[in-house]
Amino acid sequence: MNKMKKLLLLAVVMTLSMTMSLARDQKAAGIKTTTFVADIHCENCSIKVMNNVPALGKGIKDVAVDVAQKTITVTYDAGKNSDDRIVKGLKSLNVTAQPQPTESCQSDKPCCNAPGGCKSQSDQPAATPSCCKTE
């Protein structure tokens, strides 16, 4: 009888451990990171965003602002927030932003695949990924 109790207790402990591990994995799977291209142009814009993170909505885990690249990178719980809600939150701070395209630098225009990139703005395809754009 004593051996039976130990086996039962061991089975319960193993089941609880696996359940907790599965729950942790599911929670981690709901974390999303999106980089937004934004109309920020100075350190004050960065400070405004960082001081008003709650305006971006629930589930925000991390925010990083890069003024030089004009990007805002937000890590959040996808079960509590979305890219659209974050865009609306940034708009409430008078910051216009859109998720950065994740497409690769592939185009039927040879200039985007050449080492020097496109030679002029007119050579660029309409939806040019940032890696193909010229300065």
Image (tube, rainbow, N blue to C red):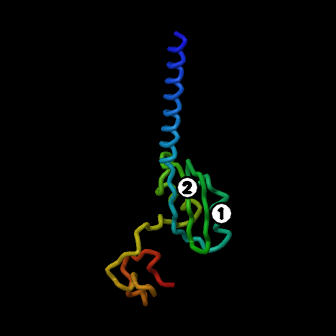
Nearest to the observer: residue 39 or residue 65: 65
Q: Residue at x 55, y 55 (%)?
A: 75
**Position of residue 97 measured from the top left corner of the image (x, y, whole percent):** 51, 66
**Seen in the image, is 18 located left or right of residue 67?**
left
Q: Residue at x 55, y 71 (%)?
A: 39
Which dot marks residue 18?
A: none
Question: Which structural element holds mark 1?
Answer: helix
Q: Of the residues under marks 1 and 2, which one precedes in the sequence?
A: 1
Nearest to the observer: residue 77 or residue 3: 3
**Position of residue 65 measured from the top left corner of the image (x, y, whole percent):** 61, 65
**Seen in the image, is 49 located left or right of residue 9?**
right
Q: Is residue 122 above or below residue 61?
A: below
Q: Residues within 10 Å of mark 2 (few under 14, many from 20)?
A: some
Q: Nearer the viewer, mark 1 or mark 2?
A: 2
Q: Is residue 32 above or below residue 19?
A: below
Name the residue furthest front.
Answer: 3
Please tell me how many numbered marks the rendered image carries.
2
Q: Residue at x 57, y 64 (%)?
A: 72
Q: Residue at x 67, y 70 (%)?
A: 43
Amino acid type at circle 2 is: Thr
Rounded to the nearest angstrom, the CA distance separating label 1 from label 2 is: 18 Å
Nearest to the observer: residue 126 or residue 96: 126
Residue tagged 2: 75
Residue tagged 1: 48
Amino acid type at circle 1 is: Lys
**Position of residue 79 measured from the top left corner of the image (x, y, whole percent):** 48, 46
| Snapshot quadrant of residue 91 | bottom right
Q: Residues within 10 Å of mark 1 (few under 14, many from 20)?
A: some
